């Protein structure tokens, strides 16, 4: 299913021409209306009229989250406040939030792009969609909400939390689409089981998950527990919110909205642009945003891009699942470790649940790694030999993947914290 087939199936030649045209328009906008970008472009001698190909994009300096914070709250807006009709902000826990503004046209574009993601993930106007993201300055709930309404889907704006009520409404309202973080969807499935609500009691058929990374193993767990088709979508508040990319039902990567955003993959250490298929940090340039355009924004998300046409017929570049963040990567005893690597190991092991905690510490000058994992059945805690065998299995599998030793601690069922928003899996005591 397509929301905008002409744009989603555009030839590479036509897409490149459209991107160049829109890039030059964006450069004109920011050059004349955002002092920060005028200074940046003047410093490298790249005025808008000098841009003749997409390769010239690489001459533009990167924009970072710190740049946005230094111009808090409205210093990077390209339109006066009388044209800004909505403000959102990041959910960051340290320092000032990153504030973004939208014009009326920006909101229409946003709704269109989210509508694409919903339809490519299997949503239709016949569905009832339950939005279990938190409403507020966070872009996730409002982004999905207006995209769903654009299609004609019935929206249940229940927000996050109050899980038993969520399940009651899901059952009573005949919810067919669940929208949440994957970690919260897992918790909801756990509560459903405890309260006697089974898959057959619900009409749920599709899960549109985002706001945090997840592994294929996590997807399998979600599909099994809920009996649904689970797809992933990607966005970030600085760029727009959800709708930047999303999976179709073939689940072979997230289709990137290249007619509105130019993606690049760079080496996070050198800043050099990498080729199709090479893994690195995602950098995004907005080319249709009016209120808050960004040039070469460093997302810190690690992924790779493919330009091969998908089985669904879409020609948009496909983005692999985010495999970690360059700033969230843990360096333990000199080894680079991403939490997603640990999750992929844990999800495939019998007798343990999907909830875990990673604790990094130091003993003297030596880093230590402990992985706490919940058991499905607490009775195994009384069987020392089985417990020891399970711990050894997990340690071995983690060592095979990570290349370093980890202490494994098996804990009682439901003893680890649950999250209704983004899961916080890592506690790094070295920074305390």
Image (tube, rainbow, N blue to C red):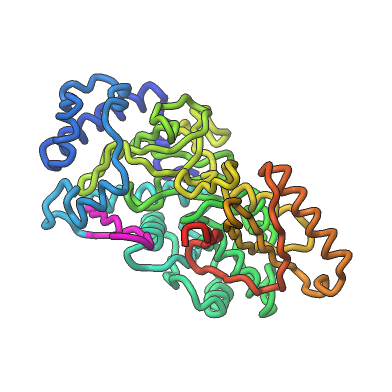
Q: Is residue 90 magenta?
A: yes
The span shown in magenta is: 86-102
How far across and how far down the image is residue 323, in percent? 54, 44
Direction from residue 202 to residue 315 in the image, left or right: left
Q: Is residue 183 magenta?
A: no
Direction from residue 8 to residue 403 in the image, left or right: right
How far across and how far down the image is residue 349, in percent? 76, 55
Q: Quadrant of residue 193?
A: bottom right
The mark tally for this picture is: 0
Can residue 110 be seen in this snapshot? no
Residue that protrudes farthest toward the front in the picture: 364
Q: Is residue 191 above or below residue 313?
A: below
How far across and how far down the image is residue 268, in percent? 43, 35
Q: Is residue 330 above or below residue 159?
A: above
Q: Is residue 9 above or below residue 324?
A: above
Can residue 366 be seen in this snapshot? yes
Q: Quadrant of residue 370?
A: bottom right
In percent of the image, x 64 and y 64: which residue is there? 355
In percent of the image, x 66 and y 73: which residue is there? 201
In percent of the image, x 57 and y 58: which residue is there? 361
Q: Nearer the viewer, residue 239 or 314?
A: 239
Direction from residue 270 to residue 166 in the image, left or right: right
How far across and how far down the image is residue 376, in percent? 75, 68
Direction from residue 240 to residue 367 in the image, left or right: right
Q: Nearer the viewer, residue 428 or 128?
A: 428
């Amino acid at each position: 299913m397509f929301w905008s087939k002409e744009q989603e199936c555009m030839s590479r030649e036509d897409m490149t021409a459209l991107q160049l045209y829109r890039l030059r328009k964006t450069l004109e906008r920011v050059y004349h209306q955002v002092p920060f970008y005028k200074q940046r472009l003047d410093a490298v001698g790249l005025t808008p009229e000098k841009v003749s190909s997409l390769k010239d994009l690489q001459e533009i300096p990167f924009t970072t989250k710190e740049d946005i914070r230094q111009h808090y709250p409205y210093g990077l807006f390209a339109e006066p406040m009388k044209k800004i009709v909505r403000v959102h902000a990041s959910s960051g826990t340290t320092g000032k939030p990153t504030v973004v503004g939208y014009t009326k046209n920006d909101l229409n574009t946003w709704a269109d792009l989210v509508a694409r993601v919903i339809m490519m993930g299997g949503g239709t106007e016949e569905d009832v969609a339950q939005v279990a993201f938190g409403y507020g300055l966070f872009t996730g709930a409002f982004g999905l909400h207006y995209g769903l309404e654009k299609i004609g889907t019935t929206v249940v704006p229940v927000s996050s939390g109050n899980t038993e009520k969520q399940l009651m409404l899901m059952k009573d309202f005949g919810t067919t689409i669940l929208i949440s973080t994957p970690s919260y969807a897992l918790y909801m499935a756990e509560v459903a089981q405890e309260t006697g609500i089974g898959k057959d009691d619900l009409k749920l058929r599709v899960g549109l998950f985002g706001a945090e990374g997840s592994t294929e193993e996590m997807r399998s767990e979600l599909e099994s527990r809920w009996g649904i088709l689970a797809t992933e979508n990607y966005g970030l508040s600085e760029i727009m919110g959800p709708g930047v990319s999303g999976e179709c039902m073939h689940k072979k990567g997230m289709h990137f909205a290249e007619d509105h955003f130019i993606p690049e993959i760079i080496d996070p250490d050198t800043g050099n642009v990498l080729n199709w298929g090479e893994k690195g940090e995602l950098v995004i340039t907005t080319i249709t945003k009016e209120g808050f355009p960004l040039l070469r924004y460093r997302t810190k998300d690690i992924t790779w891009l493919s330009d091969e046409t998908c089985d669904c017929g879409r020609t948009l570049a496909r983005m692999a699942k985010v495999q970690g963040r360059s700033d969230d990567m843990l360096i333990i005893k000199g080894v680079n470790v991403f939490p997603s690597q640990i999750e992929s190991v844990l999800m495939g092991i019998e007798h343990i649940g999907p909830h875990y905690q990673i604790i990094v510490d130091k003993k003297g000058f030596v880093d230590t790694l402990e992985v706490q994992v919940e058991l499905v059945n607490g009775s195994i805690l009384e069987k020392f030999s089985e417990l020891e065998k399970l711990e050894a299995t997990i340690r071995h599998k983690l060592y095979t993947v990570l290349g370093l030793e980890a202490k494994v601690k098996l804990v009682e069922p439901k003893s680890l914290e649950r999250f209704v928003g983004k899961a916080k899996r890592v506690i790094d005591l070295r920074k305390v």
